[in-house]
Image (cartoon, rainbow, N blue to C red):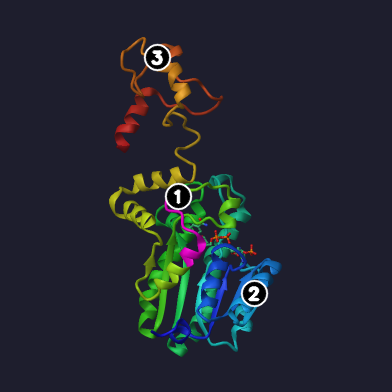
Amino acid sequence: MTSFRDRYGRWALVAGASEGLGASFAECLAEQGLDLVLIARRESLLDDLADRLRERYGVEVRPLAMDLASPDLAGALAGVTSDLDLGVLVYNAAFVPVGRFVDADADALERAVDVNVRAPVVMLHTLLPGLERRGRGAVILMSSLAGLQGTARVAAYAATKAFNTVLGEGLWQELREQGIDVVACCAGAIPTPGDKRSGKGRVPGMLDPDAVARRTLDALGKGPRFVPGWVNRLFAVLLTRLLPRKAAIRLMAGNTGDRRNPRCRCRSRPRRSQRASWSRPRRSRRAPWGRPRRSRRGRPPQRGRGLKRHSWRRQRRMRRRTR
Ligand SMILES: NC(=O)c1ccc[n+]([C@@H]2O[C@H](COP(=O)([O-])OP(=O)(O)OC[C@H]3O[C@@H](n4cnc5c(N)ncnc54)[C@H](OP(=O)(O)O)[C@@H]3O)[C@@H](O)[C@H]2O)c1
């Protein structure tokens, strides 16, 4: 069997390599005997990783501490890779502004576009001609299940991930005749430091970063899009083929903590403790959710002022329309 190095070239570049999934990619590639260019902002983390990989696998590692959002990205990449037989490109870095789009800082949204969209385009446009000249190579673009449809509370991030998936698919077709394998990896949740900082807990289908990196490298040459883990693959089929678009968007919104428009309180199911207080079967034996009630006492408690509240009739109509 041809080794990874013979198949693609001596050097690999990982953008976003200081920790989490990027560090796992770096380790898997070093294990395959590839020399590495590692890019991230935190120099000390990069240096520690570089030392570890040199010691453990005997590979050459060039750490490059820089911000991928910088306007001079193309020049910096060309400078550091000009003398290398670069075969594998991994774009892993991402910036995730979490929260409602209208409340987000404009700078944060622009940064998400710079790091998640502009930088991979610049990187690929700068480095792919070299791979094409050599007639071999591999590209991995990290994307996400969040990008398979719109996702509330990470709307801009999800849109940038959709961009990466579609970019990867287009390049897969364009470059396969040139001997370059491209894959967009639509990962589910991965317990990385970045993910932990955003405060998410464990969710079904979570895979550790090493498993995601290894499986994604194995998926090179097998198709344009890869979803690691069978739970995530089932989820992706559900989102993209089985559910109507509205339901898929709502399901993902549930995962990111936005089940409903916060300005409209009527569609949320009250907590069990609240339900007990207002669905007492005194007036009607069965008090199903949504049944209009006459007395104030029977209504769910108000949780704050100034929030929009639809009439019970309107709520019923909305429920029917979205069924
Ligand atoms: N974690 C998940 O649950 C999950 C799920 C689906 C998809 N993904 C995708 O998987 C990829 C990796 O996720 P992750 O959780 O490992 O991310 P992470 O923990 O936030 O790590 C991202 C890496 O990118 C680097 N980076 C971020 N911004 C950068 C910038 N402006 N310039 C240079 N380097 C930068 C970070 O290093 P520095 O901070 O040192 O710069 C870090 O090494 C992302 O593309 C993400 O969209 C993740």
* Circles 1 and 3: CB atoms closer than 8 Å: no
N-term mark: 1 or 3:
1
Residue at image location 60% in from the left, 60% down from the top: 111
Label 2 crowding class (10 Å Cα cut-off): few <14, some 14-19, many 20+? many
> Closer to us: mark 1 or mark 3?
3
Residue at image location 35% in from the left, 83% down from the top: 177
Ligand 1 quarter of the rendering: bottom right
Rendering coords of residue 43 (x, y %):
70, 69
What residue is pinned by disc 3?
Answer: 280
Number of the label disc, if any, that sits on residue 50: 2
Q: Would you identify the image quadrant in which residue 237 lies?
A: bottom left
Q: Which residues are magenta?
A: 203-213
N-term mark: 1 or 2:
2
Is the residue 212 above or below the residue 178 in the image?
above
Is the residue 205 above or below the residue 24 in the image?
above
Which type of secondary structure does the marked residue at label 1 adopt? loop
Residue at image location 58% in from the left, 52% down from the top: 196
Instruction: Please tell me which residue lies in front, 104 or 55.
Output: 55
| Residue 36 seen in render | yes
Q: Amino acid at mark 2?
A: Ala
Q: Is residue 319 left or right of residue 106?
A: left
* Circles 2 and 3: CB atoms closer than 8 Å: no
Number of the label disc, if any, that sits on residue 151: 1
Q: CA distance from mark 1 to mark 3?
A: 37 Å
Q: Amino acid at mark 3?
A: Arg
Residue at image location 38% in from the left, 12% down from the top: 294
Rendering coords of residue 154 (x, y %):
51, 50
Which type of secondary structure does the marked residue at label 3 adopt? loop
Q: Is residue 224 left or right of residue 198?
A: left
